[in-house]
Image (cartoon, grey):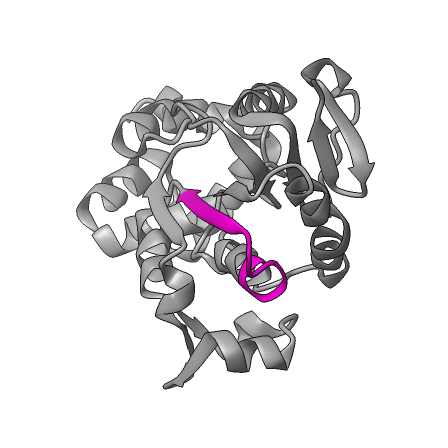
Amino acid sequence: MSSSNNTYEWFVKAFYPKSGLDLNFYKQNQMERRIRSFMNSNGHRTFPEFLKALDQDRELYDKFFKHLTINVTQFFRDTKQWNTLKDVIIPKLIAKKSNLKIWSAGCSSGQEAYSLAITMLEYFPRVNFSVLATDIDVKVLEQGKKGVYRESDFASTPPELIKKYFSPTEGGYEIKSEVKKYVTFRRQNLLTDRFDSGFDLLACRNVVIYFTEEAKDMLYRKFADSLNPGGILFTGSTEHLFGMNHLGFKLVSSFFYQKQG
């Protein structure tokens, strides 16, 4: 094996055709550290040997893909921001229209998408809405469609909402079909796929942390194009759109940005 094969750059190039995930869009230091730590903990010393193992072991591949795409989420994570959404942002949006098109981008296993649907059903019962939930990981999308969650997913969820919108099941809860019918799950690569348009509210939270600045800029441009004028982008608590004025977003509340025009 030539030493030029055992480099991070070689792995990035070789992994892309297999996965559709272009690791060039992610910050190299952080991503390389994540990959090497996964390799070490699974007993692989070189990139070519690891790539071969990924080809031969579907379970290892799925575990690795999940490790890369960082699926950590909860229902109503960051309570303060969900309260702002309910008390300030959605009332602003529905003052102008009675039908909201909502998108949860990088939805993981659906906790955020269902939190959005529950917010609408609970506090704005007369408003028509739909939620699109997209992620690159097929496994987490399957879990979202099933809608079965562990007790630990509900640390930030008001007990009365659990009682109203979930049914107890072994080891956790299942989302009721009256909520499921508002949410459509779809596989999507945020960095390379085309986006739908006409959204009023777009939640993309704790997804872009590991992206390069160029990748973030490209993504936020695409988000701006997919939102209606006056539409809102809802970001995660570590994500600020500093210097993003050129995209036409205006900060309306912490972590909420409105498309101008």
Instruction: Let me know if residue 72 appears in the view.
Output: no
* Residue 155 rendering spot, x and y as whole percentages: 63, 74
Q: Residue at x 56, y 19 (%)?
A: 218
Q: Residue at x 57, y 38 (%)?
A: 202
Dividing the picture into quadrants, the one containing residue 214 is: top right
* Residue 42 rendering spot, x and y as whole percentages: 38, 56
51 within the magenta span = no
Please determine whether, in this image, residue 121 is positioned above or below residue 196.
below
The quarter in which the N terminus is drawn is: top left
Dividing the picture into quadrants, the one containing residue 169 is: bottom left
Q: Which residues are magenta?
A: 120-134
Please determine whether, in this image, residue 227 is positioned above or below residue 172.
above
The quarter in which the C terminus is drawn is: top right
Q: Residue at x 44, y 23 (%)?
A: 9
Side of 10 where 17 appears, left or right: left
Please determine whether, in this image, residue 39 is positioned above or below residue 167.
above
Instruction: Let me know if residue 91 appears in the view.
Output: yes
129 within the magenta span = yes
Q: Residue at x 41, y 51 (%)?
A: 66
Farthest residue to the left: give it.
56
